[in-house]
Amino acid sequence: MTLADGSVRQAYAKLSEWLKTAPAELLNYRVEEAELLFRRIGITFAVYGDQQAQERLIPFDIIPRIITAEEWGRLSVGLEQRVDALNRFISDIYGRREILKAGIIPEDLVFQNEAFRPEMAGKTPPHDIWVHIAGIDIVRVDSETFYVLEDNARTPSGVSYMLENREVMIRLFPELFSRHRVAPVERYSDELLATLRSLAPRSSSADPNVVLLTPGVYNSAYYEHSFLADKLGIELVEGRDLFVRDDVVYMRTTEGPKRVDVIYRRLDDEFLDPLVFRPDSVLGVPGLMAAYHAGNVTLTNAVGTGVADDKAIYSYMPEIIKFYLGAEPILKNVPTYRCREPEALKYVLDHLPELVVKEVHGSGGYGMLVGPHASKEQIELFRAKLIASPAGFIAQPTLALSTCPTYVNSGVAPRHVDLRPFVLTGSDGVRIVPGGLTRVAMREGSLVVNSSQGGGTKDTWVLDE
Amino acid sequence: MLSRTADNLFWLSRYVERAEALARILEATQRLASLPVAYAGSSNEWESAVFTAGCDDGFFAKYEDATAETVIDYLVFEKENPSSIVSCFEVARHNARAVRTALTVEMWEAINGAWLELRRRQDRKLEGEELTRFLGWVKEIGLRFDGSGHRTMLRNDIYDFSRLGMLLERADNTARILDVKYHLLLPKETQVGGGLDYYQWSAILRAVSAVTSYHWVYRESLKPWLIADLLILNDQMPRSLAACYGDLVRHLDDLASGYGRQGPAQRIARSTRIKLENAEIKQVFQGGLHEFITEFIADNNRLGAAIAEQYLV
C-alpha cells in the first residue's frame, strides 16, 4: 500500500483515510460478521457439513486489494497476449509442431510431459481454441512491474471466491463502495456463459445446451461447481447423466435424452472417457472422445492443455510469445533456472538458501522449497532430490513481492499477495472481468499464499476511474 | 430436468416421509407396550412394529427377540438397516446435497440440521421420555421439510417430483400399517370388543395421526370398519390411500401437461384412484380386507416402478 518513501499509494488513499477513522471495534465486528456470512454460505449453500464447512472457511481478509484502472489496463493487455500465445502454442504442439521443429523448446519437454495427450495429435477442437478459461497467477514486485508466477490452462479454480468475496464485501462495507468506483465482477457468470455458448460446435442448434461436468459431491471443489452451475443457470451433470449415441452426447432428462453441445468440464483429462483414458474411471462418459473428435461437442478446456501448466514449459513463455506473436512479452516471467540443464543445476545447488525450488508438475504450494525460510535439513533434502531427478524441478529467485494491508491480530499490517485473474477466450473474442482472486499469505513474511498452506483471500478492487 | 436430479428429489422426500412414518409407528408402539398386560394381551407390540416397518427380514437376521431395546436400536439407529431413521436421514441428506440448488434454503436446512444433530448423538439408547422426545423431534423434522417445501418451492417439476416421492411413500406406509393390523379390524368371533381392541384400534389411528380426525368425521366411538374407511377411502384424510392417490394423480398430470406427454405412470395412478373412488368399505370387507390391501401395495409398487422408468433413469 505504501511506497518506498512512506507515502500512501494513490489507489489506497481513500481506503487509508477510512481505516484511520474507523474504530477498532467496528473492524472486529465486521470480521466476525464476515465469518458468519461465510459460514452461512458454507452450511446453507455450499452443501458441506460441520467439519467440511470448517475446512472450507479459508481465511477471508476484510481489507480489499486495490488496483487502479491504469494498472489494470496494462495488466489485461498483457494477460490477453499471454493467453493468445498459450492457445497458439497448444494448437501448434498438437498440430504442425513448428516450435519444436524450430528447436525453441526441447521435444522431450512436450512429449515426456505427463499432461501431453497423444490422442489429440492432429486433432482440432471446435474453433481451434484450446484454453477457454485461463487463470494466470500474477505477482507484483514494484509499482511498475507485474510478473507471471504460473499459468493455469487446465481447469483453473477459485473464481467462486472472487464472486463471493465481493458479495460479502458489499454487504459488510457499503460505505467503502460509495467512496470508490469499483468495477463490478458479478457479470463474470454472464461473460462465462457467453463464452461457452460461442464455443458450441457448428453442428449444434442456435441455442446450444451448455452443461458443467463435475466429478461429484465428493470432489473438494464441488462447492464451486454447484455454485457456478447455479449462477450460470446450466445443469450440473455427472458422468452418469451423459451418454453418447452415434457420436453425439446426450444427457438423461425427465423429458428424455437432450443433446449436449458444450461441456464445461471440471474433470481431469484422464477421467473423461474410460474407452480412451483410464479404463477404471466411472466419472467419465464412454464414447465422449469419439464425439469430441467428430466435432459434435466442445470440451472446455480442450483435452491436453495441461502441458502449459508445467513449470518447465512456463520458463519458455517469453520465447513462446516471441515465436507466435513476434512481440515482446508485456508481462514478465520470473527468471527461472531449469534444473534439467547442467549449468542451471549447478547454480541452483550452489545457491539453494536464496532460491525457491518447485516441482515442475507440482501445484498447491506442495513439493516446494522456499530457501530463505527453510531449515538446513530441508535444504539438504531438496539437494538430494535435485541431484536424483534434476528434470523434475525448476528454481526461481525469491522476489521482493509487494504487500497489501491486511487485518491481522496486531491490527493492519502488510502481507504478501498474489492475484489470479481469469481470462475467457471464446470464438467471439477475449473477455476479462476486472478483478480476480487475491490470495494473501496470512503469516508475517510468508511468501506462500496457497490455502492449503495457511493462505487467505481478499476482495480485489479494480477502480473504474 | 436431469433424471438424476428428479430421482434424488423423489427419494429425498420418500426417505424423509419414511423417517416420519417410523417415528409414528414407534410412538404408537411405545404407547401400546406401556399398557398393563391385561390390555396388551399376548401380542408382542415391538415385534409388530418391526413388521409394520417392513424390516422383519433384516431384524430377525440380527436379533432373536423383539424387545423395546433391540427394536429401537434397529429401527432408529442401525446403519445396516436401510430404513432406520438414521439411515433415512443419511440418504436424505446425501440426496439433498446432490440437488442442493434445486431445494430452497429452508428445506436444505431442515435436512442438514437433522443430519448434523444425529451425527452429534453418540448414545444409541433411548428410553421412556427420552424416546418420546426424540420421536417428537423426528416428526418435527418431517413437518419442517414438508412445510417449508410447501411454503417456499416454485410449483414446477421439482415440486412435483418431491411431492410424488412423499405421496407414494405415505400411501405405502398407511397400507403397510393396515396390512399388519388388518386382523384387528376384522369382525371377531371370540374376544369381542373390550379394552384390548380399543387400544389397538386407537393405536392404528395414532400411527397415522388420525385420532382427532376420526371423531370429526364419524362422530362416534371407534369402529373397526370406520377406521378402515377413514384410512382407505376418505379423501379428506391426508394419509388415506384415496387422498394420496388424488394428489399423486394431480402431480402426475401437472408433469404430463408440462412435458406434453402422458405415460404409463399417469395411467396406473388414474386406474388405482378410480378403484379407490368407486370402492365402498362394505365391499372391501366382503371381498377381504387383506386381499384389498395386498393388491393396493402391489399397485403402488407398480406406480413407483413406472415413475422410475418414465422419468428417473
Image: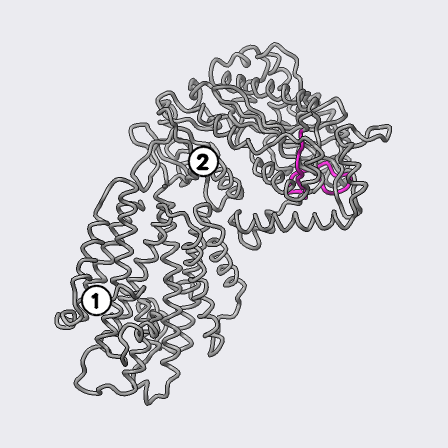
Q: Which of B51 and A227 is in front in this view?
A: A227
Q: Residue A179 carries which label?
A: none
Number of residues whose C-alpha sits closer than 10 Å to that of mark 1, classed few (under 14), some (14–19) or many (20 or more): many
Question: Which quadrant of the figure contains the N terminus of chain B?
Answer: top left
| Chain of residue at mark 1 | B
Q: In this view, does B85 lie above or below B214?
A: above
- Give the residue number, with chain letter if any, for mark 1: B293
Q: Which of A231 and A142 is in front in this view?
A: A231
Number of residues whose C-alpha sits closer than 10 Å to that of mark 2, classed few (under 14), some (14–19) or many (20 or more): many
Q: Is residue A207 above or below residue A176?
A: above
Q: Quadrant of residue B256?
A: top left
Instruction: Choose mark 1 or mark 2, whichever is in front.
Output: 1
User: Which residue appears at 42% of the width and 38% of the height?
Assistant: A235
Q: Quadrant of residue A163?
A: top right
Which amino acid type is marked by label 1?
A: Ile
Q: Position of residue A266 (x, y in %)?
A: 48, 35
Q: Where is residue A70 in the image (x, y as percent from the top left)?
A: 70, 22
| Chain of residue at mark 2 | A
Secondary element under disc 2, as helix, strand or loop, is: strand
Q: Is residue A46 above or below residue A199?
A: below
User: Which residue appears at 24% of the width and 67% of the height?
Assistant: B232
- Give the residue number, with chain letter if any, for mark 2: A212
Magenta span of residues: A441-462
Q: Are marks 1 and 2 on the same chain?
A: no
- Based on the picture, tell me whether residue A457 belongs to the magenta stretch: yes
Q: Which of B43 and A290 is in front in this view?
A: B43
